[in-house]
Amino acid sequence: MRYTLVGNGRMGQQVQSVIEASPEHEVHAVLDVDAAITAGCFAGSDVIIDFTVRDAFLANLPAMIDSGVPVVVGTTGWDDQVERISAQAREAGASLMYSANFSLGVNIFLRTVREAAKMIGSFDQFDIAFSEQHHTAKADFPSGTALCAAQMILDANPRKKTVLSALSEDRKIRPDELQVASIRLGSVFGQHAAHINSDFDDIVISHTARSRQGFASGAVEAGRWLATKHRSTPGFYTMDNFLDEVLG
């Protein structure tokens, strides 16, 4: 399969390394910050993988959709636009797959967190919070993965209604607020944890990334899946859709 990569930062370079190490795939083109992005840039590609920043992704999206090539998006920070963009992709007959984190390990972790949040929902003695750590060069917080986990917890646990990403000096946290704490430290690749507490127990469900390769490999696998899906059922997809189909 031929991949065009939009973005040549650390994640883009890692994705390129994964593709180049595979006998099944090849890098068709790499479009960096200086490239003028048009639909024609993607001619001859089977999949587009975008790891840029919010503004660049939103600016480049019309050209990517117009190209007719399925798009895997690892860029975060545009969750407020998901409904509009998913509708735009469907109306155009395009295929777009978005995840804040394409690591298979992280997505297994997220499903575990969701199930735990659902189970403790029936027992008032349990409280839950979430935390994430990343390197100091990461601009957004909480991380996209943490926000994804938070939404899963809100959906699964009826006692939590809203996300609180920063504590206040003048009030206590409310029982219906889900705290999502962020730490920026050195060169940490990514650590996420759900913390469950009662008077009798402490339960911690965690995931620690050892390198960016897990994210990159997952994005390449997602691209292969999306290219097949696009031929029969174009649309807007997530890693949940991918895992549901793979796991049956």
Image (cartoon, rainbow, N blue to C red):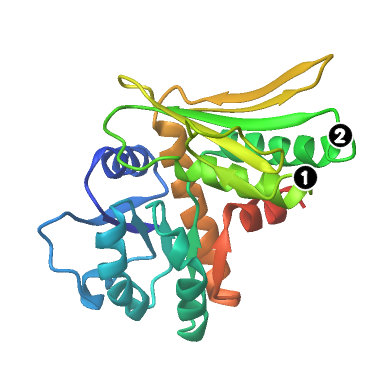
Q: Determine the image quadrant of residue 149.
A: top right
**Residue that badge 1 annotates:** 159
Question: Does 22 sit left or right of 245 as displayed?
Answer: left
Left or right side of 238 for 58: left
Which residue corresponds to the image point at 39% horizontal and 32% vertical from the top-left?
212
Q: Residue furthest top?
A: 200
| Nearer to me, 56 or 153 | 153
Q: Which mark is residue 124?
A: 2
Report the quarter where the N terminus lies. bottom left
Find numbered disc 1 in the image and state the secondary structure of the residue it sits on.
loop
User: Mark 2 and mark 1: span between their CA atoms?
Assistant: 9 Å
Q: Secondary structure at mark 2?
A: loop
Label 1 packing within 10 angstroms: few (<14), some (14-19), many (20+): some
In this rendering, does residue 94 appear at all? Answer: no
- Kind of residue at disc 1: Arg
Q: Is residue 158 left or right of residue 43?
A: right
Q: Nearer the viewer, residue 55 or 163?
A: 163
Residue type marked 2 = Asp
Q: Residue at x 39, y 71 (%)?
A: 69
